[in-house]
Image (spheres, rainbow, N blue to C red):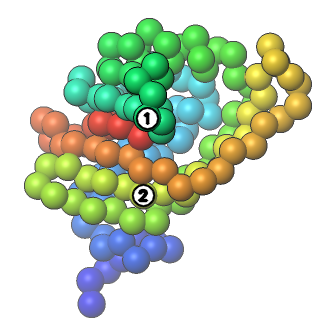
Amino acid sequence: MPRRLPGTDIEDTPDSRAVLDVLTAYTRAMEARNADAILRLVSPSFRDDGGTGSPQDDLDAQQLRQVLPARLSRVEDLRLDITVKKMNFTEDTAEVVYFYHSSFRVPAYSNKPKNESGLKKMELRKEDGSWKLLSGI
């Protein structure tokens, strides 16, 4: 029986560990509100639909570089927990299904902490030997 990543049913491979490392780096960068660190994880081909069918909240890599620093600067006390549920690999891409729980404050709107949680999907692609985020942040 193949080895599994700790606490999961995901096969322990160099690629699954590398993808998990990207998710860990993403989580740390989010909690630190470090837009530059997040952007270093993003592919130039990044595209995200914001989880909606409306094109108004769609972002590509260039737009993300413009909006992410401002968005993170408005947030305080950000905590993010990601639990990977599934990873599917096809050639040079990976699809990760994960459960997230985040808590944060946006003082411009309210000092009351806001909590969000749910299932999300993140897509990554192996580019020049390292995994980069394509969507799902």
Q: Nearer the viewer, residue 95 or 50?
A: 50
Residue carrying label 2: 97
Looking at the image, residue 137 sits to the left or right of residue 3; the answer is right
Marks 1 and 2: CB-CB under 8 Å?
A: no
How packed mark 1 is, by other alpha carbons closer than 10 Å (few <14, some 14-19, many 20 or more), is few
Q: Nearer the viewer, residue 14 or 132?
A: 132
58 to 17, vertically: above or below: above
Q: Secondary structure at mark 2?
A: strand
106 to 129, vertically: above or below: above
Compare marks 1 and 2 and give the one earlier in the sequence: 1
Q: Residue at x 55, y 38 (%)?
A: 28
Q: Secondary structure at mark 1?
A: loop
Asked where in the image residue 76 lies, by quadrant, the reply is top right
Residue 129: image location, x then y, percent? 15, 41
Residue carrying label 1: 53
Q: Residue at x 59, y 17 (%)?
A: 71
